[in-house]
Image (spheres, grey):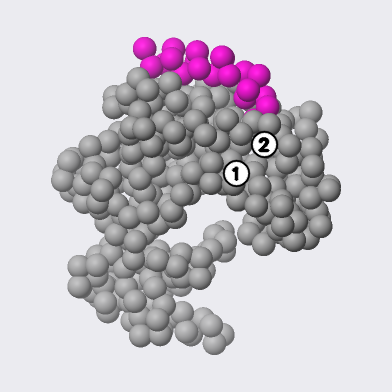
Amino acid sequence: MIEELSVTRRIKELMQLYGISGEIVVCQRNNSGHINDTHYVVVLTPRGNRREFIFQRVNTQVFTEPLKIMHNISVISEHIERKYGKNSRETYQIMSYLNNRDGKNYAELSDGSFWRVNEFVEGVAYDQIDQPKVLHDTGYMFGHFQNMLSDCDTNKLEYTIPDFHNTKKRLDALRKKADEDPCNRVSRVEDEINFFFDNSQIADELVKEQESGVLPLRVTHNDTKYNNMLVHAVTKEPICVLDLDTVMPGLSAHDYGDGIRCAANKAVEDETDLSLVGLDKTYFESFTKGFVTEAKNFLTEAEVNSLALGALTITYELASRFLLDYIDGDNYFKISRRDHNRDRAKCQMQLAKDMIANFDYMENTIKRYYQ
């Protein structure tokens, strides 16, 4: 009860800062998120109108520089508004936040808490999808996201997570942690460690191509899972892209690759029966068609040629991160069973191996939709 009163008090303070007048008739916490505190709020205005909002307290223990996150969101939102018009269809295809009386898209309260507010958008986000059309639309929406921002100056953006997809540095971190062996677990995963070092060239290629200028930096989402797209509950039509906290400069190949890693695995991310793990070609084609047919409006030939490698690289990278966390004692990723991170690493390794076996198919499919 004390916590509920505290939340209500904070939301009333926020309503004043945002110029929202009326009576709170619903204040309901959304427990689906794992990091931020999210509250669905209904306000009855003095004129009797019903308005729905999302009030979200940002976890500054996880997002230690929230101002950079909100700066990036402001940059891309303003770019899309200038490019397409404030009330255009495109402006509503990304989640945007309201500005308060000071013109900021966030608010810091007297108790030090960091908040943001948006109008509630009706729709659903799926944690599991078995419908090729939804995967096609997911690919389309993330391709469209990059297309809308393809002429946005990446120099205006902050790096909210430096070296987030620098796979070479991720591999160096794994090597260092394996040498330290803080929890005496290395002897249990020697084969897995050898896989990464035997295939270290995977970690190098995209980094080298970006550093040499072959691959341009784009405005990228960096978390292109299908549960970060809101769809209509009945028609399943895409509504908008969610979770912009990781937006920053990056490679198109990484966004495409993470979408494929999530969408086109035959099994769940932590499957222990590795015979079930592999590239689902139906899902691969669905996501690829959606992404490439939209993104080909701006992608260079070098970028198109990098997409299949992006899928392999991201899968390899995440597997290395799971393995590092296992060796380090499971300090980063939440686990629900013993050896959970080792299971995740082995699953992603198996998917990477299947991508290597099907690499020509992946490249040919991408080029087919690029033509």
The answer to whether the residue labelled 1 contacts the one labelled 2, judged by CB atoms less than 8 Å apart, is yes
Determine which residue is flagged by label 2. 197
Could you tell me which residue is drawn at 53 percent across and 83 percent down?
3
Amino acid type at mark 1: Leu
Q: Is residue 369 magenta?
A: yes
Left/right placement of residue 364 relative to residue 10 reads right
**On the image, which quarter does residue 216 sit in?**
top left
**On the image, which quarter does residue 261 sit in?**
top right
Left/right placement of residue 168 relative to residue 180 reads left
Can you say whether 323 is above or below 197 in the image?
below
**On the image, which quarter does residue 129 sit in?**
top right
Amino acid type at mark 2: Phe
**Neighbour class for label 1 at 10 Å: few (<14), some, many (≥20)?**
many
Front residue of 338 and 195 = 195
**Place of residue 167 in the rendered image (x, y in percent of width and height, measured from the top left):** 53, 41
The image quadrant where one finds the N terminus is bottom right
Residue 138 visible from this viewpoint:
no
Front residue of 66 and 142 = 66
**Place of residue 297 in the rendered image (x, y in percent of width and height, measured from the top left):** 29, 24
Can you say whether 203 is above or below 123 in the image?
above
**Neighbour class for label 2 at 10 Å: few (<14), some, many (≥20)?**
some
User: Which secondary structure, mark 1?
Assistant: helix
Residue 98 visible from this viewpoint:
yes
Front residue of 149 and 300 = 300
Extent of the magenta region: 351-371
Query: Which residue ends up furthest to the right in the rendered image?
Result: 188
Could you tell me which residue is drawn at 46 percent across and 18 percent down?
366
Q: CA distance from mark 1 to mark 2?
A: 8 Å
Could you tell me which residue is drawn at 76 percent across and 44 percent down?
343
